[in-house]
Image (cartoon, rainbow, N blue to C red):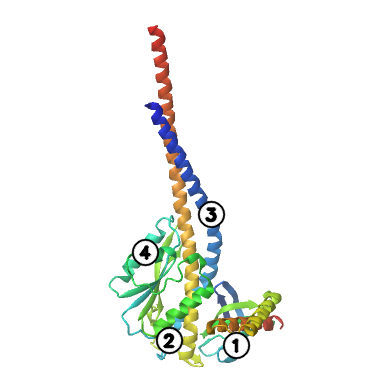
């Protein structure tokens, strides 16, 4: 019996070792990809910040409400752009984002524009209305794809299909921490902090040729830029989450192997001891 | 110097420039324009063309500047172009190859769909802007 048990333990060690090899490889791949993705995400952060800052200021100081992008839409329906990953095995990366999104959309009539295979699968499974699933692979989305997405979203918004457009993505806080976040995209009046000067006056801004034309030209660009930078940030978050998850998995596997080897060695010693006892007993009996 | 203003040029690929400058010239969707210090609060969309930046020390740098927006608020100018390439960084050979390719496509393909034609044309414009900016 001991021999059979030993064999099972040995097999188990082998299989854990194989799994560990895979998780270790995934960890290393994620770590090396992460470096590049992080640089890219960090490089696009100033753009995101400046763009948001400028548009918030403009939205606050805007007194022209001719462009449909600046005033709230009449439709109650919302569009959520959800940026998730293409693959699993990234810890809670996808699950956290979906949980967060569920909370965001609660109580609204909504449609989603999923980016990333996991997001497409998730929302299709739940029977949520999908705006387009042409951008299933987040890793392959380029800046020109972002322009195309932005254009189609703007057109749908102009047609009054949606009253609000928001985005859910995962913010890259640090290597160890990635937090799901949502951000309003349209209309521009959705931006928070409607601060006025101390004396309650607003600065006027000159728009050339006209505020309407400026907004119509800027808004698709702004959407594309924001989408592109958010995708970069999300990809970096995904890789960081995967690296952490795989690191934990590798650690767990090596701990398991340690325990199993201990058990195996004990069993081996026990069987040797038993054999010796049997031999001695046999010799004495003779 | 009171005649300078703070300029920040940011693209999706990162911060292209930040510092005090005397003058910024670029092409908006409405035509060429220059921004000097103490300009009125201003906002416009950027077209396609060569941009010039007159630095604080009087030197001038040129760049290919395409798309995006420009805002001037409280003597602080933010230029957020889709692409911004300093003239010295432009790969002329690549731009010329892109121009030739686009021209050939436009000549040959009469059956080009409307969307493809627009895309090829904008490729051609971009290449021409790059070449024009690099040669200055």
Are labels 1 and 2 on one chain? no
Q: Is residue A18 above or below residue A204?
A: above
Q: Earlier in the sequence, mark 2 or mark 3?
A: 3
In percent of width and height, residue A145 lies at: 51, 74
* Residue carrying label 3: A29
What residue appears at the point 53 percent right and 63 percent down from the top-left corner? A37
| Crowding at mark 3 (Cα within 10 Å: few <14, some 14-19, many 20+) | some
Q: Which mark is nearer the camera, 4 or 1? A: 4
Q: Closer to the camera: disc 4 or disc 3? A: 4
Mark number, residue A122: 4
Check disc 3 and report its element: helix, strand or loop.
helix
* Chain letter for mark 2: A
Say which residue label 2 marks: A61
- Which of the marked residues, 2 or 4, is nearer the chain's N terminus? 2
**Image quadrant in which you'd find residue B29:** bottom right
Mark 4: secondary structure: helix
- Asked if both marks, 4 and 3, belong to the same chain, the answer given is yes
Question: Cα distance, mark 2 to mark 4?
Answer: 40 Å
**Pick the front one: B54 or A51:** A51
């Amino acid at each position: 019996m001991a021999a059979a048990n030993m064999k099972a333990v040995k097999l188990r060690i082998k299989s854990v070792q194989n799994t560990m090899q895979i998780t270790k490889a995934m960890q290393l791949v994620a770590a090396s990809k992460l470096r590049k993705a992080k640089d890219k995400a960090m490089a696009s952060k100033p753009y995101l910040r400046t763009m948001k800052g400028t548009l918030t200021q403009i939205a606050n100081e805007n007194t022209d409400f001719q462009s449909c992008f600046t005033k709230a839409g009449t439709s109650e329906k919302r569009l959520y752009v959800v940026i998730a990953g293409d693959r699993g095995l990234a810890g809670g990366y996808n699950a956290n984002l979906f949980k967060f999104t569920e909370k965001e959309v609660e109580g609204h009539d909504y449609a989603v524009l999923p980016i990333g295979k996991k997001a497409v699968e998730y929302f299709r499974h739940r029977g949520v209305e999908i705006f387009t699933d042409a951008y299933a692979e987040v890793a392959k989305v380029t800046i020109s794809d972002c322009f195309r997405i932005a254009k189609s979203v703007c057109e749908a918004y102009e047609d009054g299909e949606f009253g609000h457009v928001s985005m859910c993505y995962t913010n890259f806080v640090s290597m160890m921490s990635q937090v799901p976040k949502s951000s309003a995209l349209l209309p521009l009046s959705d931006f928070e902090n409607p601060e006025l000067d101390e004396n309650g006056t607003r600065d006027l801004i000159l728009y050339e040729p006209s505020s309407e034309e400026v907004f119509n030209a800027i808004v698709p660009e702004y959407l594309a830029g924001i989408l592109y930078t958010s995708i970069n940030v999300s990809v970096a978050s995904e890789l960081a989450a995967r690296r952490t998850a795989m690191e934990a998995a590798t650690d767990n596997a090596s701990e398991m192997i340690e325990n199993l080897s201990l058990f195996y060695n004990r069993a081996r010693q026990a069987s040797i001891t038993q054999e010796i006892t049997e031999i001695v007993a046999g010799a004495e009996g003779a | 110097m009171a005649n300078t203003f703070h300029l920040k040029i940011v693209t999706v690929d990162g911060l292209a420039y930040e510092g005090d400058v005397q003058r910024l010239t670029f092409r908006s969707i409405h035509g060429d324009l220059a921004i000097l210090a103490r300009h009125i609060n201003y906002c416009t969309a950027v077209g396609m063309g060569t941009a010039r930046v007159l630095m604080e020390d009087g030197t001038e740098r040129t760049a290919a500047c395409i798309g995006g927006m420009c805002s001037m608020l409280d003597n602080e100018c933010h230029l957020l172009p889709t692409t911004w390439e300093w003239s010295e960084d432009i790969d002329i050979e690549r731009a010329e190859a892109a121009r030739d390719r686009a021209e050939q496509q436009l000549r040959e393909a009469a059956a080009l769909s409307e969307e493809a034609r627009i895309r090829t044309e904008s490729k051609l414009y971009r290449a021409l802007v790059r070449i024009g900016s690099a040669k200055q």
